[in-house]
Amino acid sequence: MSGLLLRLTGPMQSWGEHSSFSDRDTIDHPTRSALIGMFGAAEGRDRSQPLERYEPLTFTIRIDRPGVRMVDFHTIGGAVPARRSVPTAEGKRRPEGQGTIVTRRSYLSDAVFTVAVEGPRWLTEEVATALGSPRWAPYLGRRGYVPDEPLVLRARAEDPVRKLREEVPLAPRTGGRVEWGEDRRPVSVRIPFVEESAPAEQDSDRSVTALNDVPVSFSGQARVYRFRSVSTGLERLPGALLTRGPDEYHRRILKYVREGRCQSN
């Protein structure tokens, strides 16, 4: 199966799966709806356009670094006259002294995810081209959360899931379980993977979760989602993928991107 490889990292990320206005949550990895939204924005597609185009895509997520979960506390509409308070759903104004709305916004700080996107070659290549020159800029769950470069590691990858397991360097401070050899060199490291699959396919070493993150419509106030099953478990990767610090990691990632471009040319 062909596809592309993405690297999602930045100072902050947020991947809401059941957010409300007052409580904007994040789960511990990118959601399908957020990734498809990123692709649609890069391609310049309107929210009202159908999303069947992206149904053939499947995602495998490697959690290089889980990051730190943090919560911001916000208030809206406090200490203002009633005429300037936040309107209700009916369009009315709240009485003076009752206009403050409390919201909490969760996000991940310093997280790194590497994502294998599989699907028809024509579709993954069009998505990769759009991400390289987007109509609307991609972001990591919220508009203020800008991704670090490089975003696209491989625009054309044969068997991108295998490359996740065997080729793409791991970010430092991975948090994975490292097995060390007698020479104090890493032999292997166990890293969390999130894969799309049905519960019947799973073994006892993996956990299965139902997520309400398959977008049916992004249209205005009529956003509709359906459920899917994902499985999460630790996979053993070669210790050679580990990097010893940010400088080495960035050098190896940039080298990996250049090698991919040379192979495409």
Image: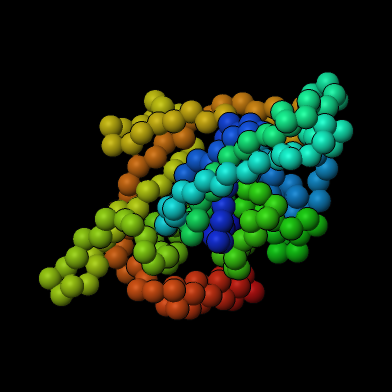
In the picture, which quadrant includes the C terminus?
bottom right
Using residue 40 as the reference point, say whether residue 31 is left or right of it. left
State the residue in front, 10 or 55. Answer: 10
**Vertical side of 18 occupied by 62: above or below:** below
**Vertical side of 148 occupied by 233: above or below:** above
Residue at 86 percent across and 25 percent down: it is 91
Residue at 33 percent across and 49 percent down: it is 235
From this viewpoint, which residue is outermost toward the top?
A: 90
Residue at 53 percent across and 75 percent down: it is 254
What coloring was used for the rendering?
rainbow
Residue at 37 percent across and 71 percent down: it is 243
Q: Is residue 257 visible?
A: yes
From this viewpoint, which residue is outermost toward the left?
A: 182
State the residue in front, 153 or 85. Answer: 85
Using residue 191 as the reference point, say whether residue 136 is left or right of it. right
Picture coordinates of residue 12, whole percent (x, y): 56, 56
Picture coordinates of residue 3, whole percent (x, y): 58, 53
In this rendering, the count of numbered labels is 0
Using residue 178 as the reference point, say whether residue 71 is left or right of it. right
Picture coordinates of residue 41, whole percent (x, y): 75, 50
Picture coordinates of residue 57, whole percent (x, y): 61, 42
Q: Is residue 16 visible?
A: no
State the residue in front, 83 or 134. Answer: 83
What is the quadrant of residue 33 in the picture?
top right
State the residue in front, 75 or 188. Answer: 75
**Vertical side of 169 occupied by 128: above or below:** above
Using residue 256 as the reference point, say whether residue 234 is left or right of it. left
